[in-house]
Image (tube, grey):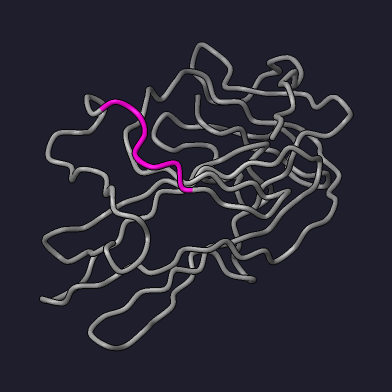
C-alpha cells in the first residue's frame, strides 16, 4: 500500500474532493497535509559530463518539530508490490538514520535498471553519468509529533567538496505520527472513483523502535 496522507484541520473537506484516474489525488492534497506515520524517499545520484563523484555523507536535517491538529486520512487502495534497493531507515523521533544495506528481491528490479549500490557511504561510494546510484530513505515516527525535515548530501568531485539538500526550510518533507485520538479515513468511491468516501477509521498500530 502507498503511504497514507494526513490532512490537517482547516484543510479541504473530503466530501469536496474530486479525483481523476489520471492524477494521483495525493499530488493535489500534499501541500495541505503530511505523510502519516511513515513515508519513503527515493534519491538518485548521477554526474553530468565525465566526472566521478564520491558520496561521502548523507545526513538528516530537522527543521521543525511540533504539534498539528489532524482532521482525516487519505488511504489509497491496492498495493505497490515489493522493492529492491539500498535502504536507509530514518527514525525522526530519535533523530537517527541507519544504513540497512541492500534489501528486497532482485526480481523486483525493473528491467534495465541499475543494481542498487552496495558500497558504504564514503570514498568508496562512486557515481558517474554511466554508473548512477539510487537509495531509498524510509522515514517514520513512533510518536504523535509533526516533523519537517530534509537530507543533506555531501560529495566530492575532483578535490572539491560540495553539499546539496533534498527538502528545505521553505519546502520540507512533512510527516506526522499517529495521535492518541481516532482519525477518520477516506478512499476513492466506486464505481467511477471521482470522489472520496468514508473508509472507516484509522486503526493502525503505532510502531516501536
The vertical placement of 94 against 122, above or below, is above
Looking at the picture, tell me which residue is in the foreground, 183 or 152.
152
Residue at horizontal 47 percent and vertical 37 percent from the top: 24
Q: Is residue 116 left or right of residue 42?
A: left
Residue at horizontal 23 percent and vertical 84 percent from the top: 158
List the single residue furthest toward the bottom: 159
The stretch drawn in magenta includes residue 101: yes
x%, y% of residue 178? 77, 34
Looking at the picture, tell me which residue is in the foreground, 75 or 42.
42
The vertical placement of 36 against 127, above or below, is above
The stretch drawn in magenta includes residue 103: yes
Residue at horizontal 61 percent and vertical 22 percent from the top: 187
Q: Quadrant of residue 102?
A: top left
Residue at horizontal 49 percent and vertical 17 percent from the top: 192
List the single residue furthest toward the top: 191
Magenta region, residue range:
99-105
Looking at the picture, tell me which residue is in the foreground, 44 or 53.
53
x%, y% of residue 183? 80, 27
Image quarter of the C terminus? top right
The vertical placement of 34 against 190, above or below, is below
x%, y% of residue 128? 17, 66
Looking at the picture, tell me which residue is in the foreground, 77 or 10.
77
Q: Quadrant of residue 164?
A: bottom left
Dominant SS of magenta comes to strand
Q: Is residue 101 left or right of residue 147?
A: left
List the single residue furthest toward the right: 181
Amino acid at each position: 500500500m502507498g503511504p497514507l496522507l494526513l490532512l490537517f484541520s482547516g484543510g479541504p473537506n473530503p466530501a469536496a474532493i474530486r479525483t481523476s484516474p489520471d492524477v494521483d489525488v495525493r499530488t493535489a492534497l500534499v501541500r495541505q497535509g503530511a505523510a502519516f506515520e511513515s513515508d519513503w524517499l527515493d534519491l538518485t545520484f548521477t554526474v553530468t559530463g565525465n566526472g566521478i563523484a564520491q558520496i561521502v555523507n548523507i545526513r538528516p536535517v530537522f527543521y521543525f518539530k511540533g504539534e498539528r491538529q489532524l482532521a482525516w486520512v487519505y488511504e489509497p487502495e491496492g498495493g505497490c508490490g515489493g522493492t529492491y534497493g539500498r535502504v536507509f531507515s530514518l527514525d525522526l523521533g530519535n533523530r537517527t538514520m541507519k544504513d540497512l544495506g541492500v534489501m528486497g528481491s532482485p526480481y523486483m528490479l525493473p528491467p534495465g535498471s541499475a543494481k542498487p549500490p552496495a558500497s558504504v557511504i564514503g570514498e568508496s561510494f562512486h557515481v558517474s553519468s554511466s554508473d548512477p546510484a539510487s537509495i531509498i530513505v524510509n522515514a517514520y515516527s513512533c510518536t504523535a509529533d509533526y516533523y519537517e525535515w530534509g537530507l543533506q548530501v555531501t560529495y566530492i568531485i575532483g578535490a572539491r567538496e560540495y553539499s546539496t539538500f533534498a527538502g528545505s526550510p521553505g519546502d520540507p518533507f512533512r510527516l506526522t505520527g499517529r495521535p492518541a485520538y481516532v482519525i477518520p479515513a477516506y478512499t476513492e468511491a466506486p464505481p467511477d472513483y471521482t470522489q472520496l468516501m468514508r473508509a472507516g477509521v484509522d486503526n493502525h498500530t503505532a510502531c516501536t523502535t
